[in-house]
Image (spheres, rainbow, N blue to C red):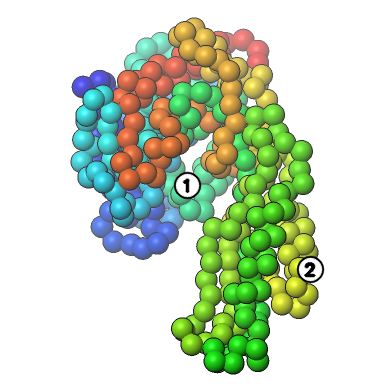
Amino acid sequence: MTRSGELLKAMVGIASVNPRAGSGPGFGEAAVAEYVRGWLEARGVRAELREVLPGRPNVVATVPGRDPRMVLLESHLDTVETAGMTVDPFAGTIRDGRLYGRGACDAKGPLAAFMLAAAELAAGDPPPFGVVLAGVVDEEHAYQGVLALISDLGDAPIAGAVVGEPTGLVPAPAHKGCVRYTVRALGTAGHSSRPDEAVNAVALMTRVIDHIGAAAPDVPPHPLLGTATRCVTRIRGGEGPNTVPGRCEIDVDRRTLPGEDPVEVWRRDRAELAALIPGRIEVDEPFTVDHALDTPATSPVPAALSRALEAAGRPAAVQGMPFGTDASKLARAGIPSVVFGPGSIADAHSADESVALADVDLAARLVADTVRSLGGGRS
């Protein structure tokens, strides 16, 4: 077993499903946060729990450095649900060098790499910059953990952040943002034997869905992220098999690019969709708003990470990611951030989620080398 195997097996074995859709045993992050705190303290890393929501604490640890500036290593404690998994979600089964289970890839694998890096840095001479390691709650739902962390950090001199997510060990200084909203078609309900006397809301909504599928967002592509996207993700309509439906709703997911304001995007979409069938279409306020990330690859922490990759014989090129992360919240708070970690996003949330343990070990070494390569000089 690699040095990450025992740690990650223990973390995956502690259920920490985000309670966005329920509660009970296995929901919430308290138990895994306590484990992370204890593991770090046993290795000389000062760590504490900071409650964000009732019974749901962030864990925040520090490794002092020679320079007052610090590097933030941030990843999340919560996972998505486990229904439909084809592997035991909490067994941490190791097979052919991969560890299987919910959170193995997203994002306990990256967090384990950060913990190993922090322990290594704490065991030697003080690193050039200090390290703040944060395992946060609620990334899979409403981002309350990272928002609380930003408040806790205050004016701390954070030089930059590495945010742990599965990127295949390729730095991602850019990712898309998102705005999600509900669209409602208002028809007139009636008896299905007399459909000509009713206005079928489902039929109205098909016109909206067809329009969304045909009308791509008119935004110039981003060099790392490509094009903005818009798609329908859920539909709800109908009251019975013999009733012409008077209402139909869809949820829309619009992925935004750097430079786009998600709320302004929603306002334009609202006007566009409402105009399709005047008086029959309503567009609700967004239920999710998240900004895109676009950190210059030349800023200190991403550049140091690329140097560490190059020194290890790995490609130092950067990439963009289509999904959102805590990094965009940190960047909007003035902390230049890059997303990085072991594992593939294709394995995240999957029925047989897993991560290669060798990649977790390599990520730990690369992160430790990144902190060391910042040096004590100006940046």
Residue at 33% across, 48% down = 16
CB contact under 8 Å: marks 1 and 2? no
Image quadrant containing the C terminus: top right
| Image coordinates for residue 299, horizontal then vertical, percent | 65, 21
Q: In this view, does 139 lie to the left or right of 290?
A: left
Could you say which disc has been placed on residue 275 in the image?
2
Residue type, mark 1 in image: Glu
| Image coordinates for residue 239, horizontal then vertical, percent | 49, 83
| Image coordinates for residue 41, horizontal then vertical, percent | 31, 30
Q: How crowded is mark 2: few (under 14 residues within 10 Å), some or many (20 or more)?
A: few
Foreground residue among 301 and 350:
350
Cα–Cα span, label 1 and label 2 = 35 Å
Q: In this view, does 94 lie to the left or right of 83?
A: left
- Rendered position, 94 above or below 56: above
> Looking at the image, can residue 280 be seen?
yes
| Image coordinates for residue 226, horizontal then vertical, percent | 66, 35
Front position among marks 1 and 2: 2
Image quadrant containing the N terminus: top left
Residue beneath disc 1: 139
Label 2 SS: loop
Residue at 58% across, 18% down = 317
Q: In which quarter of the image is residue 291?
A: top right
- Rendered position, 276 above or below 152: below
Foreground residue among 349 and 191:
191
Residue type, mark 2 in image: Ala
